[in-house]
Image: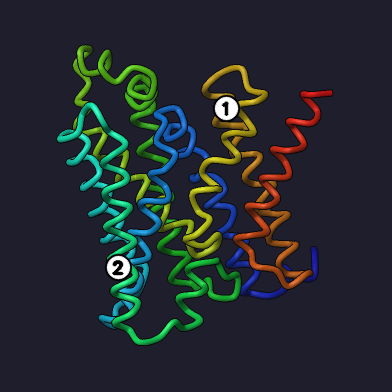
Amino acid sequence: MPELLNYEFMQRAFAAGLLVAIICPIIGTFVAMRRLSMIGDTLSHASLAGIAAGMGAGIYPLWGALIFSIAAAIGVEKLRKRFSQYAELSISIVLSASIGLAVVLISLSKSFNSDLMGYLFGSIIAVNTLDIYIILSLSIIIIISVWLLYKEFFYMAFDEEGAELAGIPTAALNTYFTVLTAMTIVVSMRVVGIMMVSSLMVVPVACSLLISKSFRNTIFLSVIFALISVIIGLFSSYYFDLAPGGSIVLTSVFILLGILVIKKI
């Protein structure tokens, strides 16, 4: 067994990282197919505001992140209905509001401490036992939800109007899917960091889209690429004293570049 796995904090980091590597591409595949890649950035900034609010209120920051990101997810869906012809405006509006609120709440705290930095860029040392329980619980909810609603999400990803005509409750499922995306953001931020969590949802999916031949195959390969990225990234962050989030995302980008070069050749 590698030396780094003798340490409990690395065991927790790998447990959290592997869970994140499974759920991010699963949700990310549907996000990419629906052309909503920017929603990850929007909800991650909302979760930053939640973390700042949680720290200021003295509650566990992940609970604040979960509340704020779910509220932002519902806000996106409400605005999408109002701007049906310009759906991307809803994401931009909520993104702007989230950034503004996060900056205000951070400024009110009068400090920019190491805990907040850990949430921004990821920290393998900061993952604790409570984080693992929260990540595991939310991951189970996300995986079971996608498994039970796979056909509906698949239909909506490619033809939302057709899905609605077929009797699928698209409004409710859109809201629920956006809430699942918010939960994915909260689950992932402890390992990857708020600033890069959307990248882990998108880049492995982009890798798999280049070589996959079916939707299910895209999900499977994107999970494989994410697992490889997390494992290599965590090893690199430990042995070379690098930020885990950056190491994981850069590994996934290098995999993408490698696939592009191989296909070119």
* Residue 33: image location, x then y, percent: 45, 27
The quarter holding residue 158 reads: top left
State how far apart marks 1 and 2 are (Cα).
33 Å
Q: Secondary structure at mark 2?
A: helix
The structure residue drawn at horizontal position 34% and vertical position 70%, both measured from the top left corner, is 103
Residue flagged by tag 1: what amino acid is it? Thr
The dot on residue 240 is: none
* Residue 263: image location, x then y, percent: 77, 24
Query: Which residue carries the number 1 mark?
Result: 218
* Residue 34: image location, x then y, percent: 39, 29
Q: Is residue 43 left or right of residue 19?
A: left
Relative to residue 170, is residue 236 depicted above or below? below
Q: Quadrant of the C terminus?
A: top right
CB under 8 Å between discs 1 and 2:
no
The structure residue drawn at horizontal position 78% and vertical position 69%, both measured from the top left corner, is 239
| Nearer-the-camera pick, 131 or 254 | 254
| Nearer-the-camera pick, 77 or 96 | 96
Q: How many marks?
A: 2
Query: Which residue carries the number 2 mark?
Result: 64
The structure residue drawn at horizontal position 60% and vertical position 39%, both measured from the top left corner, is 204
Relative to residue 145, is residue 68 depicted above or below? below
